[in-house]
Image: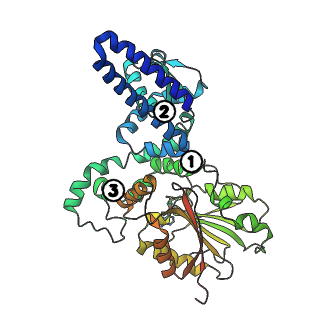
Amino acid sequence: MFSVEKSCFQTVIRSEICLGVKAGGWDLVMMTCRISAFSKFETVIRSLEVAATKPADTVFSFRAQVLENAAISFLFELGILDGLVSRQGAEVTAAELAAETSSNELLIVRLMRVASALQFCEETSESTYRATHLTPYLTTPGFKGGLRWTETFFPIVSKIPSYLAESDFRLTGGEPTQTAFQFTHGKPAWEVINEPHLRHEFDLWMRERKKHDERSWHKRYPPSAELAKESLKTGEDAVLVVDIGGASGSQLVDFRTQFPGLPGRFVLQDIQPPTMEGVAEGVEVMVYDFFTPQPVRGARFYYFRSVFHNWSDEKCAEILRNVVDAMDPDYSTLLIEDYVLPARETQLRGAVEDILMMVVLNSLERTAKQYEDILHAAGLDIVNIYAVGANEEGIIEARITKGRW
Ligand SMILES: C[S@@+](CC[C@H](N)C(=O)[O-])C[C@H]1O[C@@H](n2cnc3c(N)ncnc32)[C@H](O)[C@@H]1O
């Protein structure tokens, strides 16, 4: 990529020098060169950033940018980005897109400027476009669902000053109703998420956002490969894994597909029943509120993904009490998959996700120390933390503290 960019850069400089000399001397030449060089650098830096980032992460971070999100939402509504993907790399002009969508050419050009700058499409020549490697990610139902859901955050931002002025907001205190979200929307986030049309979008998004992560928990967590050798409990009552707050159960389904021969039941629990097809045969769905006693006792794994970050320490203590009471100290393991923020130099994605949790749910992303504190208070010890990249959720493995019983 560097050599392509370098030759483009040299061509730009040469042509700008010719233009500048014709138009009005060396000052103009130097100024034109500088502007052109900076603009070219910006493009190169953006290209490098996109090349160095997983497509799912690039799309993830764009969705919170208000005006970029507005432009892409227009393009979705017009069906333009889906149209680019279905062309499989073939080029299309703004005039053709305008005719196809009964829209106007200027509108397409304006919207596609944003999409091109974000590298969600490539402008191959003036007003002519084709898909990039990011376009198919962006147009999956899951990412579209993620965008719909993100729209509920935008009004909150404009309300923050009046929220702070009018509420007795505290940085601590765990009620999920004392939020900027509730101040803005007049009801708690879970009530809005669970409205049927949004809940479906939310479930699609939950399923999609980690689909492209080649290192899902059961591949990362070392004992999963060793489980076949373990003396796992068998029989009708034996439970291998309970996915608590598991939404549509995408992780459970992947796990079961990967290890079809393992004994024991696979139980998916959530306060809401799944809104979509895709809960595989052999997975038991159980409507369950994790603030009540856990009915499934002595499972090998109790697994929570993206659940603890939704709740304050006080609420997590209640959830943990219910799960610890059901665990077999000699057999059960608790697995939590969530961001584990470093003590310093947190990457932007994790830092921003933490603010999202604060304004929406009065909750937080935690460091390893913060997890250690809440788990220890519940009678659990961290055995290990399996982290990967800076922008990845880690997996915390915990067992009941020896001598607790
Ligand atoms: C952020 S989502 C994570 C879903 C899933 N674990 C995943 O990673 O795709 C949190 C889940 O917790 C569920 N939840 C919220 N309150 C709950 C409760 N009191 N009992 C059980 N599940 C609950 C929600 O319905 C939602 O599916």
- SS of the residue at dot 3? helix
Looking at the rendering, in which quadrant would you find the C terminus?
A: bottom right
Give the percent coordinates (x, y) of residue 10: 47, 23
Q: Is residue 99 left or right of residue 243?
A: left
Q: Tell me, yes or no, whether the two marked residues, 2 and 1, touch with CB atoms within 8 Å.
A: no
Give the percent coordinates (x, y) of residue 233: 76, 75
Q: CA distance from mark 3 to mark 2?
A: 31 Å
Q: Is residue 19 left or right of residue 139?
A: left
Give the percent coordinates (x, y) of residue 68: 39, 37
| Residue 181 circle label | 3
Taking depth in this image into account, of 199 and 121 the one nearest to the observer is: 121
User: Residue flagged by tag 3: what amino acid is it?
Assistant: Phe
| Residue 119 circle label | 2
Q: Nearer the viewer, mark 3 or mark 2?
A: 2
Tell me the colour scheme of the image: rainbow
Residue at x-position 63% and y-position 74%: 333
Residue identified by numbered label 1: 208
Taking depth in this image into account, of 34 and 84 the one nearest to the observer is: 34
Res. 347 in view: yes
User: Residue flagged by tag 1: what amino acid is it?
Assistant: Glu
Residue at x-position 23% and y-position 60%: 164
Q: Tell me, yes or no, whether the two marked residues, 3 and 2, touch with CB atoms within 8 Å.
A: no
Tell me which corner region of the image, top left, top right, bottom left or bottom right, holds residue 111.
top left
Give the percent coordinates (x, y) of residue 365: 44, 63
Res. 293 in view: no
Label 3 near ligand 1 (CB < 8 Å) = no
